[in-house]
Image (cartoon, grey):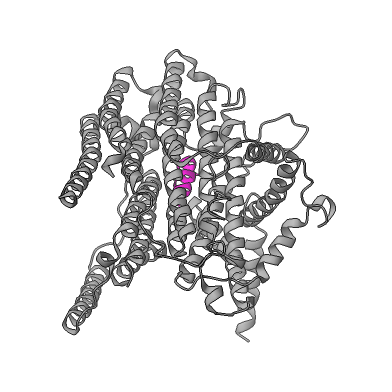
Amino acid sequence: MALDSWSLVAIFEIVVVITTFPLLVFGWVMSAKGRNPIRDAPFESGQTRLGEARLRYMMQYYPYLIMFVALDVVAMFLFTWGLVFASLPVAQDYLFLVFLIVLVVPLGYALYLSGRRESW
Amino acid sequence: MQGLPAIQDIVNLAAKIITSRTFLEIVVFPGFLNVFVGAALLTWLERKVIARVQLRIGPLYAGMWGILQPIADGIKLLFKEMIFPELADAKLLMVCALGLMMIAAAPVVAIPFGDGLVIANMDVGLIYVFAAISLFPTLILLIGWGSNSKYSFIGGLRSLFQQVAYEIPMWLSVLGIVMLTGTLNLTDIVRAQEKLWFVVPQILGFVVFFAAVLAELERIPFDLPEAESELVMGWMTELTGAAFMVGFLAMYTKLYVMSALITALFLGGWSGPSILPQPVWFLLKTFLVATVIVIIRGAFPRVRVDILLRTGWTRLLILAFANVFVTAMLIWLGFGWFWRV
Amino acid sequence: MPDIAFLALSGLVIASAVFALEARELIYGAVGLGLSLIGIAGLFILLGAEYLAMFQIAVYVGAVVVLILFTIMLVERERGRIVEEEEPVRLGRAGIYVAGLVALAVAAAVILLAPVSPEAPEFYRAPLQELGRSMASSYSVALVILGLLIGATVVGGLTLVKIEQKEKTSGTAQ
């Protein structure tokens, strides 16, 4: 058995599932089952449920998700840079600085756009 | 009799696997049992410490100092009925609760509890941990949506935006450490702190990382997804019985694992005088961090959602970049050798 | 004999992709996409690109799938409903799956029966330091262009939405 790191991750996850899954099964089997309208209603602190639950709630923060995707990719490149930072000649650090500056301007504008509530 | 030698072989193989060091590491320490017992202990610790902060006593009757309270809670929750609303997707909720537990426990595979005492010494250990953490918003969003209840859905959305907002500052605040040590291997990062813990030169990174971890854990002052006076239990509202137990345990597993991560990254991991063995130092520091996080819960009010998101996206991001800049200065001025492994 | 891990991961990728296509709810489709992408990250690990695999999970499954899920959840119900299909369409789809399986069987037969050595070629596992160094030196221009592209994408996306919202509000105001 080649026990490299990733097989260990897989084995660990299997152990977690083997231990946690029976808890769920046990709970499912042991629980009383009474389906009546009062029990099946979602919990709204005693009020009867009115209206659809899945509405458009926090749409004004949608730009944050888009910026998150972009910055996630940027973080990937920044980590490759950070790994070799100490041994890089200074000129190549400036290239990464250019990369960052080229990003900062559009992202700053994006933050400004997302702050203006009337767009949403 | 062809069958008997085969059975003997299987038994031998099973015995060899079970007593092998790797298996013990995975299941007992620093693996699954460590995480499970640690999370259960943290539920007790939280209730005791919060009680003392609020001038109460906390769990008292279940065993001495109420230490058996988590077991009592677990048994109670196992036998409660799992009520799901009629329009909710019960299977999706249960699968996602299981997924939460899997992902909350996953980072422990790479975290070293002692020199060499790590399940898998990954060369990309640090970003493996970040990849695991980044899977939480997906699951929480699915649970919030799948519950088909206003409280759950709003809580799930808030949790998504909060965690997404603080993930980038979390990653960037660790970039300073990566620059100083030149490795993503958590064992090497801990070894590099033998002379001086990273909390000193990376104090800015530490502050940003700590705040971001508080936001990822949805702890006060960032506990808007679980705002108890507004949303009952946030995205966990419609999880009941055993599913709630798994979800609840996943939250505290996340707390335990993140505290261990903070210890490994900033507080020197297992380093300490040789009076106590290394894993004991690691656990002491981890529980110290967890206690501080719990005390913060008792001391701060909740941050409003738009301030929360704006702070994460602007101020913490700027602070994290400042930390990178300061670290770059440090290295350019020639201090980088201090933390070479 | 092909690696068991490779077979398992490829099976995961294909099975979750098929599940994503065939699921009744769009949400399950997005979940299937997420599973498929995790399988692809596993394939990256098999190829020795662990760094890429970790960020594949973090970026794709952690960000892109979340974006897709969020968009699905907030689309109006009428637009999100799956249309019931008729008989000819279903037969056509079954035909495509059968054709795919036949193609797979033929390809597997050709590969396994080919008179060449089944040794996997040695691939170069780059140490992590190499990534940074090559980013800074050989690929630096590409990096800056990528930065411009990312910035343009973000601002473009937001501006598009702003234009749509303006059209919608000005349309209803009249």
Most frequent secondary structure within the magenta stretch = helix
The count of marks equals 0
Residue under the image location 50 percent in, 60 percent down: B99
Residue under the image location 43 percent in, 56 percent down: B141
Toward the viewer: B170 or B66?
B66
Q: Position of residue C90 (x, y in %)?
A: 21, 80
Q: Position of residue B244 (x, y in %)?
A: 59, 62
Toward the viewer: C167 or B157?
C167
* Quadrant of image for the N terminus of chain B: bottom right
Question: In the image, B47: left or right of A32?
Answer: right
Determine which quarter of the picture holds residue B73. Answer: bottom right
Within the magenta stretch, is there residue B129? yes
Q: Residue furthest top?
A: B333
Region in magenta: B122-135
Residue C89 lies, with reference to residue A86, above or below; the image says below
Q: Position of residue B72 (x, y in %)?
A: 74, 62
